[in-house]
Amino acid sequence: MKPSLKNPLKQQLQQHFNQVQLSDSQFEALEDLMNQGAAHVDTPAGRRLWGSLAVAAMFFVAVLTTFMLSQFSGTSLENMPQLIAEEVVNNHLNMKPLEVKGGSINSVRGYFTKLNFMPAESKLRALDSLQLLGGRYCSLQGITAAQLRMKQGQNLQTQYQTEYLPEVFGDLPRLEKGEKPLIVYAKGIKVKVWVEKGLLFALTDSAAINENMENE
Amino acid sequence: MAKTMVLDRENLQKLHRYAYSLTANEADAYDLLQSAIETSLNRPADSVNKTIAYIRMIMKNRFIDDYRHKQSFPLEDIDDHSPVSMDESSLEDVVIASHDLTILWETLEPIDREVLFFWAVEGFSMREIADKLEISRGTLLSRMHRLRKRLTAGADDMQRGLA
């Protein structure tokens, strides 16, 4: 076969990427998706009402919707600790198999090479009685995280660590400032949430799960 | 109040191409973009740039999460202290045939494809790319040094009909 014409790498890459095209139907699907999101946030639900009675009803719905949306938008980050706790507890109850085993952060750190951060030891005293068993990759609110499993007597606990992004996770207590972890309950299980060393930590405090319940 | 930004087609196309730089497959890139946009709707940003940055972050994290069992996504396997005999312009003089690039593209590591996307399509400098990927400039240049060798060797092999 005759060799094809060589061109500078940058030019070839640009041409290569230019061939990657969304089709009209794909554009429309993505635009619909975003428009739905925009409508969910911005559009009062009562606009479809008609007639003079509809005007009054529309006004009522608009006022009600505005009130509800203002409540929702003002508390979305305030609810974040609850969302974090629920996600941590759901995964705690699932007890998925560990991907790496080790008794110390140092021994498992080498496994977590695909994170944007380095898993760290916390100085929280509640962790003194916990023995690390291992960990696995996970995510918290869409952010890649390390999920660590720890043993406390006969019970197993789950600790999450991820990069602390204030714009995603909101304002959380910082251990270095002397603030105490936030305590949130989800499905009856206590979860401590705090920020330390630039990381977000979440730790279950559950008495119900023991080693026999591990799905390994 | 922050509201959902509706991105125009140009930005959607760019995001799709960024997703393609990760997946090396157009269908997978579309799925990745669609799911990232869905997730982004939960936390509306107050500017187009923030929305784009957020969707990119979601796609990258999801790609690493979803594909880690299928493909490696090495960020740490480069010796940061290895000698670097190239500068930022060293990729500029690499020449390659379109057909060879298409074949080699799928064999590259995702991080290499991501770097090439930022370099060729977005026009970022190596410093900017290193900042984006949160790796040192030395690590990035070492990576590019190996990539250059791989691209030129692979292209030469294909031109000679060895590959």
Image: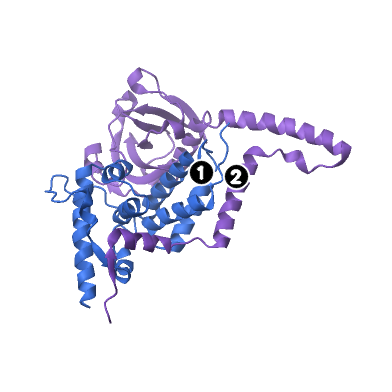
The colour with which the image depicts chain B is: blue
Q: Which residue is drawn at 31% across and 23% down?
A: A125
Q: Which of B106 and A20 is in front in this view?
A: A20
Mark-to-mark CA distance, 2 and 1? 9 Å
Residue that carries the numbered disc 2 in the rendered image: A37
Residue that carries the numbered disc 1 in the rendered image: B40
CB under 8 Å between callouts 2 and 1? yes
The quarter of the image holding the N terminus of chain A is bottom left
Q: Residue at x 48, y 31 (%)?
A: A81
The colour with which the image depicts chain A is: purple
| x and y, in percent, of residue A190 in the image | 46, 30
Q: Nearer the viewer, residue B130 or A63?
A: B130
The outermost residue toward the top is: A178
Q: Is residue A23 above or below residue A134?
A: below
Look at label 2 and name its amino acid: Gly
Q: In which quarter of the image is residue A195?
A: top left
| x and y, in percent, of residue A72 in the image | 61, 32
Q: Which of A186 and A170 is in front in this view?
A: A170
Q: State which chain disc 1 sits on.
A: B
| x and y, in percent, of residue A197 in the image | 31, 28
